[in-house]
Image (spheres, rainbow, N blue to C red):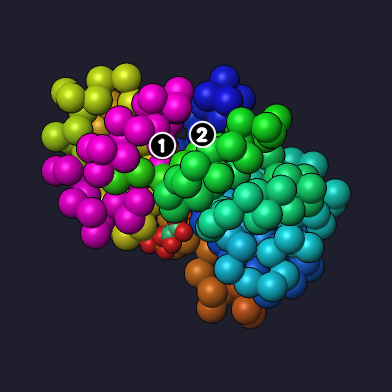
Amino acid sequence: STDRLLPILTGQPVIPVVAVESAEEGVSLARALAAGGLPAIEVTLRTPAALDAIAAIVAEVPEAICGAGTILNPSQYEAAVKAGSKFIVSPGATVELLDAAQESEVPFLPGSATPSELLAMMQEGYEVLKFFPAEQSGGLAYLKSLAPVFQSLKFCPTGGVSPDNAKDYLSLPNVVCVGGSWVAPKALIKDGRWDEITALASEAARLKG
Ligand code: 3PG
């Protein structure tokens, strides 16, 4: 699973975390983000249109690498896979989700924050984890202090990551990429200001640690 996930996550410094109100909105957004250099996106299952949007993006935006996020249970995992998602992201992990991931070809990025959760994920064979919610869980200092203890683990911090702190996260050796919603602000999506989203994406795509 890491073999299929890592190339996606190392391909760009920021994975946009998006919420869309329609399939059409998803398609335009995915195009705008890919045009700015961020082909991999996480469409969250927080809106009723999410699954339709994923299917539409997969069908109509070949340059995008569309993943699904906010996956909370196996039925959402299966629905997201059926819609064509290329990767699956959860804020946490349960035995049921890990079982679903085991049976799926589509790679899983589970969320973890505490040392015991990290140990449990290591035991399951996961080497790349979402660190969520990053800022609220202790941010940079917390991630830094995990590094010497959990030497094999790599993270995608998400939650409270912004243009102000993204560079600092990306400079940590145990960070592969960051996730964030700032590149796809609700107000710009609502008004179809795709060029501005492309501009935000190009700035984010240039971020380096
Ligand atoms: C997520 O689902 O990963 C987060 O809600 C994204 O957090 P952000 O909105 O603070 O970037």
- Mark 1 or mark 2, which is nearer to you? 1
Please give the count of numbered marks on the rendered protein.
2
Q: Quadrant of the C terminus?
A: top left
Q: Disc 2, ligand 1: is the CB inside 8 Å?
A: no
Label 1: element kind: strand
Residue 58: % across, % down: 79, 48
> Which residue appears at 68% of the width and 39% of the height?
86
Is residue 130 covered in magenta? yes
Residue 98: % across, % down: 53, 38
Residue that label 2 marks:
9
Q: Amino acid at mark 2?
A: Leu
Q: Is residue 9 above or below residue 3?
A: below
Is residue 125 covered in magenta? yes
Q: Which residues are magenta?
A: 114-142
Front residue (pair 202, 13)? 13
Residue that label 1 marks:
129
Tell me, yes or no, if residue 77 can be seen here. Answer: yes
Q: Is residue 68 above or below residue 197?
A: above
Q: Quadrant of the N terminus?
A: top right
Label 2: element kind: helix
Residue 65: % across, % down: 67, 41
